[in-house]
Image (tube, rainbow, N blue to C red):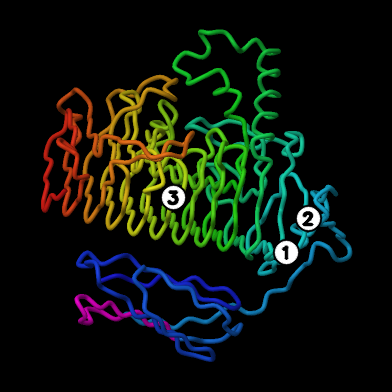
Amino acid sequence: MSELHILRTETSVTVWWEKPEEYIPGDKFIFRLTGPASRRETSVVTHVTAKGLFPDSEYIVEVRFLHQGRPVWELEERVRTEKERPKIDVTKAPYFAVGDGETMNRSAIQRAIDDCPAGGTVVIPRGVFRTGALNLHSDMELYISEGGVLLGTADPSDYEPRIMSRFEGIEGMCYASLLNIGELDRERGITARNVRITGGGMVCGGGRALMENTIAREKALLSESGFARPEDTYGIEKEDTVPGRVRGRLINISCAEHVRISDLVLRDGPAWNIHMIYSSDIVTDAVTLISKHIWNGDGWDPDSSSNCILFGSQFFTGDDAVAVKSGKNPEGNVIAIPTEHIRVFDCKIHYGHGFAIGSEMSGGVRDVKFWDCDLSGSYYGLEVKATAKRGGYVKDIFFTDCVAPRIQIHSVGYNDDGEGAEHPPVLSGFHFRNIKITGLAKNEKTELFESCQPVVLRGFEEPAYYLTDVTFRDVSFPENAEDPIEAEFTADMNIEGRSF
């Protein structure tokens, strides 16, 4: 039986639960909220948000699962909405931020954040508020109102001083992100907790211009230091790879816990958009992520983190919509902090590469579940990618009730610098149920659909590191696919209910 996971604000309650194994198309969930403002609705997805509630009020939440029209289980929880939070409007005295899209507001907004008491909210009202990097602290909310935009500049100097982070599996000093939660310090452990970013507005980074300016600036610094020789860049994707690793993100979450990002448009980070590193209990819901034409423009990247939840969201990304990571050889093998207990559901990709695990997965990845997702607008679909040098493992991956152009579990040949591990990665336990594979991938350049191999399964040549324990149950393939599954170095594959 599932359990209810409840998220509260002053005026809303969001409930989510895992999809029951016995669920079949046509089954339903009945949601009921009883209290000062009641709600009742039928849902075919595994989350519901009730808005317009009263602060500091008690409600009873009930969810009933109807399987083939019959109740199988019913869950009930009591929940109290949050008390009204003290609020700081950044446009009021003594801050006087100006939302004209031109005035630089970094100091004013940061001062408001620093002044925000525990349990308080900093409000960005309607308008376009230009800023550089901002640092949030524990026990606060950043509320970007509908019609409000937090706009990052394209000047790398506005994201200094640099901070410790990890990009493409390598720890190092990077430019700060537009929004920063916590500090990367593995010895200290958790450095921030209980942070929320929400409100219905937009967080917009410096985008492609900031990406290009950062890389150009770093290339000049590397050239001055003498780093740029061919032998220094062996195994690297292209000449911009190393200087590109110092880019900030849109939102950086480091060594933090209990963070929620919801009800926002998030767009145009200079690299990844939401990156959580060495963190836990991170929830992202009801967001739209946009990063077209941004190199490494991933949407949502849990990295050596656990209990990260994403649902009810849309993607238009310049790279992977979701990329589950845990570090790269050799550093990732030494640190050895896995990414685990990841849940992604009720999401849709309109443009981008797809859902990925890797290629940085040397610390291990396990217990990842995707359900009720539409990847038909992506190019790669669901892709598990590693290299023989990575080490680590990817285990216990579940992909249920989804649509995708293709599924790939294989080795890739890029992002391959760094000393290799003692053995290849262990790839085991991949379970696909009720999946429609279209065999049509959306080309990211032309945005036209083109035919592709529906399934590619390729482990490693050493028998001890074959891809193992792969199950397809009720998976449909394209009608014109003569041999839909291309498998090599793969063992223990089981196909049930195969259809075309």
**Which of the 4 image quarters holds residue 82?**
bottom right
Residue 113 is situated, as x and y percent measured from the top left of the image, at 74, 58
Instruction: Please state the extent of the stretch shown in magenta in the rendering.
Output: 60-74
Report the predominant secondary structure element of the magenta stretch: strand
Which quadrant of the figure contains the N terminus? bottom left
Task: Name the residue at 15% across, 35% down.
Answer: 483
**Which of the 4 image quarters holds residue 345?**
bottom left
Q: Could you tell me how far apart the alpha carbons at marks 3 and 1 are, in whole angstroms?
A: 31 Å
The first of marks 2 and 3 along the sequence is 2
Residue type of the residue flagged with mark 3: Ile
In the rendered structure, find residue 349 and report the number of the disc placed on it.
Answer: 3
Q: Are marks 1 and 2 in contact (CB under 8 Å)?
A: yes
* Residue indicated by mark 1: 122
* Residue indicated by mark 2: 109
Residue 118 located left or right of residue 330: right
Residue type of the residue flagged with mark 1: Val
Q: Could you tell me how far apart the alpha carbons at marks 2 and 3 are, in whole angstroms?
A: 33 Å
Task: Name the residue at 28% across, 52% down.
Answer: 399
Residue 216 located left or right of residue 487: right
In the rendered structure, find residue 267 and report the number of the disc placed on it.
Answer: none
Under circle 2, the secondary element is helix
Task: Name the residue at 53% across, 12% down.
Answer: 232
Residue 435 located left or right of residue 389: left
The first of marks 1 and 2 along the sequence is 2
Residue type of the residue flagged with mark 2: Ile
